[in-house]
Amino acid sequence: MKLFGVDFTSAPSRRKAITIAGGIWEQEVLQVQELHRLTDFGSFEQWLRQDGPWLAGFDLPFSLPRELVQTLAWPLQWAALMRHLQTVPRAELRAQCKAFCDARPAGQKFAHRQTDRPAGSSPSMKWVNPPVAYMLHAGAPRLLQAGVSIPGMVTGDPQRIAVEAYPGMVARSVTKNSYKSDDPAKHTIARRDARMQIIAALEAGTTPWRIRVDCSAVRESLIEDGSADLLDAVLCQMLAAWSWQRREQQFGMPLFDPLEGWIAGCDVLMPA
C-alpha cells in the first residue's frame, strides 16, 4: 500500500515548499522511500489526483470548530462549508475569526475542535503563530475538489484516502525539546540531536502508536534538514500508516463530529 505524509504550507514557494514523504506499508513496517517538495498549488492539486490506491496524512486542519461555524451562520455540513470557504477571501476569514475572539473574555478567545485538546494542536481558527486557519483555507477545499475520501467526513474516491495528521503531537511524545526552526541561524546542534532522538523512536517503534518506520533511505536528509519539514512529513506518514493498519476499524477513527474532523491517532494519548 502506498502511504504518504504531507507537511503543508499555505503559501508554497521554493523557500517553503509543500513537503511529501512517500513509501509503502510492508510486513508491518512503514518503509520511507522518497521525499518531494512541491513549490506551487498547481503541482499539489495534480499530486492529489494521482491514481490510487493510497492513503495520506496531511498536516493541516480539515475544518473549523462547530462553535465558530454556528456563530458565523456558515454551512453546518463539511462539503458545503468547504465550498463556502472558497468564496471567502483569506483577509475576510481573518477578520471574522478576530471579531469572534474580540467578543469573548480573556482566556476563552478561541473556539476549539474536540480533537484539538487531546492532540495538543492549535485552534484551527488561529491566524497567527501558527497561521493554521490559512492552512485550512488553502488546503481543505482542495481536498474536496480533488475528490478524495476522508473517513467519517466525506465519501469520495475509495482508492485515495486522506486523514488529518499532526506531527507536533508525535514529536512531543518523544521529546519536549525543540527540533526545528525556519530560521537558519537557529539550526543548532541541540535541535539536530532532538531530530535524531525522534528518528530513533520511529525506527524502534517506541512511540505511543507503535509503528516501526524504516528511515534508512532518507535518514541523513531528515537529520540535516533544520526546518524539519522533511521529518514532519514522515511523522504525518507514520500516522497514515497507523490509520491504514486500522482500516477495518474505520481507519482508527472514533465517533467524532463530522463537521469538525479528527486528527488521526490523537485518542491514543487520551486517558483510558
Image (tube, grey):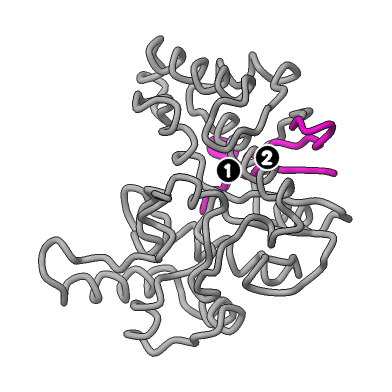
The kind of residue tagged 1 is Asp
Side (left or right) of 9 relative to 99: right
Residue at image coords 67%, 65%: 150
Relative to residue 159, is residue 250 drawn left or right?
left
Which residue does the image show at 38% across and 69% down from the upper left? Answer: 91
| Vertical order, 252 against 63 (above or below) | above
Residue wearing tag 2: 20
Q: Earlier in the sequence, mark 1 or mark 2?
A: 1
Q: Position of residue 109 (x, y in %)?
A: 20, 66
Q: Amino acid at mark 2?
A: Ile
Q: Is residue 10 magenta?
A: yes
Q: Classify 227 as above or below 91.
A: above
Question: For this rendering, which residue is in front, 81 or 29?
Answer: 29
How many residues crowd mark 2 within 10 Å: few (<14), some (14–19), many (20+)?
A: many
Residue situated furthest top in the rendering: 189
Which residue sits at x=39%, y=50%? 121
Q: Kindly state the secondary structure of the residue where label 1 is placed.
A: strand
For the residues labelled 1 and 2, say whether their Cβ atoms are less than 8 Å apart: yes
Residue 70 inside the magenta-drawn segment: no
State the SS at label 2.
strand
**Magenta-drawn segment:** 1-30
What residue does disc 1 label? 7
Q: Relative to 100, is 247 on the left or the right?
A: right
Quadrant of res 149: bottom right
- Residue 41's x, y, as percent? 65, 55
| Residue 71 on image: x %, y % | 32, 85
